[in-house]
Amino acid sequence: MLSSLVLMAIGCVGPRPTTPIHETALGTVFLESVSDTSFQAAHPIKLPETTVADILRGIHTKEKTGLLLLLGKALKSTNLNDIRTFSEDDIAFLTPHIVTALAQATPKQQVGFHVYSTPAISQSSKVGQNRETTSGYLFADGLSLHFTLTQYRYRPGKKSNASQKEPRPLPDTDGLRDREVTFLPEAALRPDVYDRSSWIGKSEDRSLAIDYQLLTRVLAAPPSSAPVAQPAPAPVLQQLQSIPAQTSLGGKNEADLQAFKEELKALQKKMDEQEAELQRLKNPPSRKKSTP
């Protein structure tokens, strides 16, 4: 009787049924059934490859830094270590197969993927051991595509990037220990009302809901009418520079004023980078067709 209970428990936590869509050495795309009764996706759905590519191109992973903690949520966008999650090669591999998977999925399935990369320093016979994995899930609901990142450049035994602050570094079990997932342009984001903790185990700062029709309009809009970030702090900084130290910010000393100016400079720099990134997203680099 005890052994029967053990087998039943193992069956309950076993892998979910999957349907392979595409599998190569570069990665895999598959459909996975979701057992949660509240899950109801808008599948099957046919999305253009350009839309899926724009979504993948806009997903970023942002490292949680001390500056972010200092400035708080009001200046959350000032994180200076913000990189795209997927390379152009990753996007070229994933896009057509994700489109195929979404067109074949049922309302009780979500699309999963694994994409593999190998660091340049490990071009040796141990390439397989050094392979890094980026994984996630996505599904359509209404006019939104919901995306969750579950692994980011994960490699067994890989240490956290923030381990320098710790006396004894801890393993990074999924590559996201010190990171959160963001999207550019932010105007295309929608509140993610789904709690995937019961479906794929974790949500935290890793899930996004992207309005794909709004994204297309934002990327197609002229630069003059495109949504921009908060008003540039440069005029504020100029005003602060003209304020005497003894009267600035309610009596704060000159060192505090200087620190505040430096934070504003960092914010201005990040906003400039985001504007440049938005322009790059509107005009992605064209890939040359290979000749036979």
Image: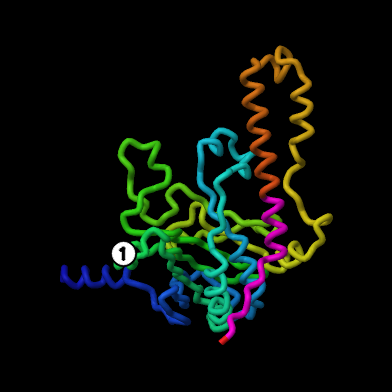
Residue in view at x 31 percent, y 64 percent: 129
Q: Position of residue 147 (x, y in %)?
A: 55, 64
Of the 4 image quadrants, the one containing the C terminus is: bottom right
Residue marked by disc 1: 129
The residue shown at (47%, 82%) is: 21
> Which region is colored magenta?
274-291
What's the coloring here? rainbow
- Image coords of residue 226 (percent x, y): 79, 56
Is disc 1 surrounded by few (<14), some (14 to 19) or many (20+) residues within 10 Å?
few
Horizontal placement of 197 versus 126: left or right? right
Q: Percent position (x, y) of residue 242? A: 78, 21
Residue placed most toward the observer, 169 or 43: 169
253 within the magenta span: no
Answer above or below: position of 206 versus 124.
above
Left or right: residue 110 versus residue 49 is: left
Above or below 263: residue 145 = below
Kindly identify the residue that appears in the image at 43 percent across and 72 percent down.
35
